């Protein structure tokens, strides 16, 4: 199976401490380019220009929260197919059901192990494309 | 992980430790303001600072600081009880003091 490469990740996170450790964790992966932004509004604008392969999205954001941001992304035909993964501490069953309903690929619960983050993202990426091929 | 990467990750932890007193100050300031004025608008910053610290401390491998912050986080949903909040805030302060005064976090 020839998977499309995961080269570009848009990270949407408002906490500078988390932003820093995630950027560090993903910077270990060669050929992976990571753009960061801190609000949902910024994410909508940045996604148009950056054309990410995958969006890593916090759920609790100031102003437009993560689920609302994903909803807006899904309304844009140019961005609607980009897989999105929530990275959040909001992981009650009703929260997860909401993320899935919005079309999120999966949820990475906070706190996470920085050293495992890139591997988790690549696993989700592979599973997503394998599922598409199977369908 | 190569040794140089390990050092860099440790550097991030040390830098985070250096920021912790500021994060605590932000919580204390937000709490003081909210407890004094009881303005609903002051509640959101308090909740945000506490929630962020609970998440980030665990991610940087500071389990005790995260647990104390998580206790506060629970109290910010949805009603703040002044007595328990003050007690939990003191416990968080103690935990941050301990890690700031020489406890070097081990790599997680």
Image: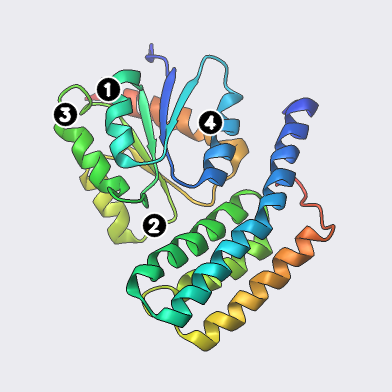
Residue B53, placed above or below residue A107:
below
Picture quarter containing residue B68? bottom right
Q: Residue at x 39, y 57 (%)?
A: A90
* Image location of residue A70, percent across then percent down: 25, 40
> Marks 1/3: CA distance?
9 Å
Q: In the image, which is nearer the foreground, mark 4 or mark 1? A: 1
Q: Residue at x 27, y 22 (%)?
A: A48
From this viewpoint, which residue is outermost toward the top?
A: A2
Q: Residues within 10 Å of mark 2 (few under 14, many from 20)?
A: some
Q: Residue A48 carries which label?
A: 1
- Location of mark 3 (residue): A76
* Image location of residue A84, percent across then percent down: 33, 35
Looking at marks 2 and 1 on the same chain, the residue that comes earlier in the sequence is marked by: 1
Identify the secondary structure beneath mark 2. Answer: loop
Looking at marks 1 and 3 on the same chain, the residue that comes earlier in the sequence is marked by: 1
Q: Which mark is residue A90?
A: 2
Picture quarter containing residue B54? bottom right
Same chain letter for marks 2 and 1 = yes
Looking at marks 4 and 2 on the same chain, the residue that comes earlier in the sequence is marked by: 2
Same chain letter for marks 4 and 2 = yes
């Amino acid at each position: 199976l020839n998977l499309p490469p995961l080269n570009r990740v848009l990270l949407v996170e408002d906490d500078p401490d988390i932003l820093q450790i995630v950027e560090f964790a993903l910077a270990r992966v060669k050929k992976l380019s990571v753009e960061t932004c801190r609000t949902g509004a910024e994410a909508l604008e940045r996604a148009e220009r950056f054309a990410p392969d995958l969006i890593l999205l916090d759920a609790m954001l100031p102003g437009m929260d993560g689920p609302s941001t994903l909803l807006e992304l899904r309304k844009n035909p140019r961005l609607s197919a980009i897989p999105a993964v929530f990275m959040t501490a909001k992981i009650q069953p009703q929260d997860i059901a909401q993320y899935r309903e919005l079309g999120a690929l999966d949820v990475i619960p906070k706190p996470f192990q920085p050293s495992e983050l890139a591997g988790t993202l690549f696993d989700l990426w592979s599973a997503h494309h394998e599922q598409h091929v199977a369908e | 992980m190569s040794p140089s990467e390990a050092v860099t990750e440790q550097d991030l932890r040390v830098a985070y430790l250096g920021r912790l007193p500021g994060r605590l100050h932000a919580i204390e300031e937000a709490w003081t303001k909210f407890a004094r004025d009881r303005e609903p608008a002051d509640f959101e910053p308090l909740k945000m600072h506490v929630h962020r610290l609970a998440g980030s401390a665990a991610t940087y491998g500071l389990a005790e600081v995260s647990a104390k912050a998580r206790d506060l986080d629970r109290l910010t949903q949805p009603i703040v009880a002044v007595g328990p909040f003050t007690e939990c805030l003191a416990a968080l302060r103690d935990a941050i003091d301990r890690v700031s005064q020489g406890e070097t976090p081990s790599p997680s």
